[in-house]
Amino acid sequence: MIKIKSSAEIQKMLKSNEIAAQALALAGNSIKAGMSTWELDKIVHDFIVSKGAIPSSLGYAGFPNSCCISVNEELIHGIPSKKKIIKEGDIVTVDVTTLFNGWQGDNARTFKVGTVSDAAERLLKVTEEALWKGIEQAVAGNRVGDISAAVQQYVESNGYHVVRQYVGHGIGTEMHEDPEVPNFGRAGRGPRLVPGMTICIEPMVNETTPDVRVLGDKWTVVEANGRLSAHFEHCVAITNDKPLIMTLESH
Ligand code: MF3
Ligand code: CO
Ligand code: CO
């Protein structure tokens, strides 16, 4: 069941998403070669708590930390660790989910650590652009499939692969609500977008295959061939006009 939000509810969601966006920006500004992903998680955790919010990834289905941090071939759900040291040239995805005043916020971005390879540079550019292609379609009257098809077409026309096993989602008082928002599919199919729907659009893009594997820690999802992967996510609301990007640092 898709829950349509009132404008008062959208206003509350904006606050949570602003905190999520600020935490993500702080993570990006804090990443340095030599630091562990655990240290980065602590920075994110402390910021969210300082804003009176809750890092809703912590304890979600047993997830042990406050955000997901996924390095290089790791796509999503990387578990922060004191043993995982970030290096110059890495690409690091941080995915931050917040709960504030009963409402969820959720965004992610793959950051560059210093100078990265041309291959990494291009993958990040295409994945972020694919997110914007999807957001462009997030208008009332369109269908979820219009978002999915726009993302898939952009990614594949650039020679990369969209992951099928994990998808974007509706969001509200729950982190994951209906509808699913896949990064693949056909234009004109799927649920109709109406004002008051709030969704997370999150292209997950692999360099060489759509396939993924889950590591022995039962969480970390990696590119099946061990090559690079990237993930960008915004939370958006469908309005009577342009899509409202909820995950901005201020509104
Ligand atoms: N933020 C993720 C998403 O985009 C979900 C986090 S999984 C968790 O849907 F286990 F870390 F919470
Ligand atoms: Co997320
Ligand atoms: Co999400």
Image (spheres, rainbow, N blue to C red):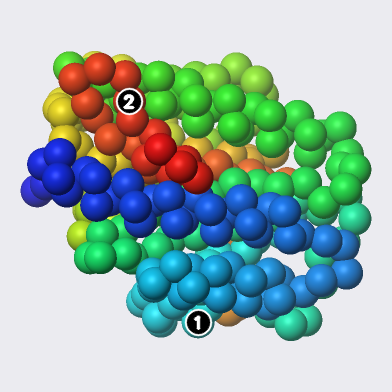
Residue 94 position, x and y percent, is 60, 57
Which of the numbered marks, if any, corresponds to residue 10? none
Whether residue 82 sits left or right of residue 180 in the image: it is right
Q: Earlier in the sequence, mark 2 or mark 1?
A: 1
Please name the amino acid that badge 2 sits on.
Pro
Q: Which residue is drawn at 82% across and 51% down?
A: 113
Q: In which quarter of the image is residue 210?
A: top right
Residue 98, x across and y down, in percent? 40, 63
Camera-side residue: 191 or 156?
A: 191
* Residue 195 visible, this orientation: yes
Q: Residue 64 carries which label?
A: 1
Q: Does the residue labelled 2 lie within 8 Å of ligand 3?
A: no
Q: Nearer the viewer, residue 250 or 16?
A: 250
Q: What residue type is labelled 1?
A: Pro
Above or below, comparing residue 179 to residue 88 in the picture = above
Residue at the spot 28% in from the left edge and 50% down from the top edge = 13
Foreground of the two, 162 or 174: 174
Disc 2: which residue:
243
Q: Can residue 215 be seen in this view?
A: no
- Displayed quadrant of residue 54: bottom left
Residue under the point 31% across and 19% down: 242
Residue for point 74% across, 60% down: 30
Beta carbon at label 1 within 8 Å of ligand 1: no
Q: Quadrant of residue 136?
A: top left
With respect to residue 46, does 9 lie above or below?
Answer: above
Report the side of 112 relative to 41 (left or right).
right
